[in-house]
Amino acid sequence: MPADSCHLCGGSLDLLDEFSALRRVTSDCRPWPAGGRLGVCRACDTVQKPADSVWQDECRDIYASYAIYQQAAGAEQLVFGPAGAASPRSRRLVEQLSSVHRLPSTGRLLDIGCGNGAFLSAFGAAYPGWRLTGAEVGDTNRAVVEALPGVERFHVGDIGDLTGGFDAIVMIHCLEHIPDPSGFLRRVSGLLAPGGLILIQVPHFQDNAFDLLIADHCTHFSPATLAAAAKAGGLMVETLSPAWVAKELSLVARVGQGPEQPRPPGEGLESARDQIGWLRRMIGAARDLPAPVGIFGTSIAGSWAAAELEGRVAFFLDEDRNRIHRPYLGLPVLAPGDSLPAHSRIVLPMPPGIAGSIAARLPDLDFLMPPG
Ligand SMILES: [Zn+2]
């Protein structure tokens, strides 16, 4: 495959030159230097980083020192509902899956990219009769995962070495890292029992521009391109929702030939350009603020903004009790009720809708709102 061809279909890519000037961030929230490349396939419309040898070398460096959920000392990131109620992301996902797909009381589940077992733990609590397997690329979390109720196996290495017959397979924040997503899904499909289902969750870059900045994400899916990748992987989509978890696409599918999908609508290039332009405007406005400046959030977007605003940031602000009052990137992490440095403005590196709901529930803070 030539260097700049699509890693889904082999088509040629239109590159977005303006992306290379932006700093990046790793999927475990560490600042990463500028210099990446972003393109959109002319044939299948998928937004992507060319998965060339430079990108693969960078990923090797990133994963060699990967530290999942490091800011919260291993606790899973909370997702905040519209009213500010927080729940762990995995529990939300299990509830959504159960509300749409009736699962039997016993079965076997495989979690590919299980991390420290957050989803296995939430699923096991809801379905104690199931036997669970976690798969990962390294051994780091073996002891933690093997200690979870219901877990019968922690697998490291190629998924082809697993014995199949799983009633459910989940891939949460996994597919966007894989340079051949459809080929991988075909292999995963082969591990399903007849009638088994697969649950995929990936970031939704059209709802969250910051996903484009994650150095080790090589595919940035839209609903249309995720559905097309699933179909090319031999799967029939039953549910595809941008609303199960905010900023994420959640897909449930089974093995089979669905109806012919319409060709993705050719929105990729415009969407990616719009999102890159928005990121540049957002961080440009933040750069114009007088000191002292705070940043709301210590995840992907907050880490990226702190790096772009290098030296100008005095503190982070976070609502997640697992993250406050411990330093992050060398700066204090304060809670909204703490006394803040006088006259400080707080940058909200968030999609506009989420930023609006945060500002509405914290009216006493002086936020710089992101562009609309
Ligand atoms: Zn393509």
Image (cartoon, grey):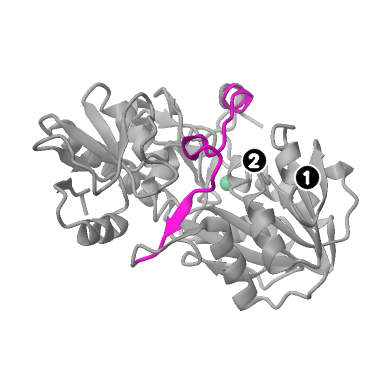
What residue is shown at x 52% (from left), y 52% (from top)? Answer: 221
Instruction: List the residue tagged with mark 1.
Output: 146
Q: Is residue 65 magenta?
A: yes
> In the picture provided, is 50 more to the left or to the right than 191?
left
Seen in the picture, residue 85 relative to 369 is either above or below; the reply is below
Q: Quadrant of residue 281?
A: top left
Give the residues drawn in magenta, as a range: 59-82
What residue is shown at x 54% (from left), y 48% (from top)? Answer: 76
Of the 4 image quadrants, the one containing the C terminus is bottom left
Instruction: List the residue tagged with mark 2.
Output: 178
- Crowd class of label 1 (few under 14; some 14 to 19; many from 20; radius 10 Å): some
Q: Position of residue 108 (x, y in %)?
A: 82, 62
Whole-Å distance between the Cαs marked 2 and 1?
25 Å
Q: Position of residue 304 (x, y in %)?
A: 36, 33
Name the one closer to the observer, 239 or 344: 344
Q: Amino acid at mark 2?
A: Ile
Seen in the picture, residue 332 relative to 43 is either above or below; the reply is above
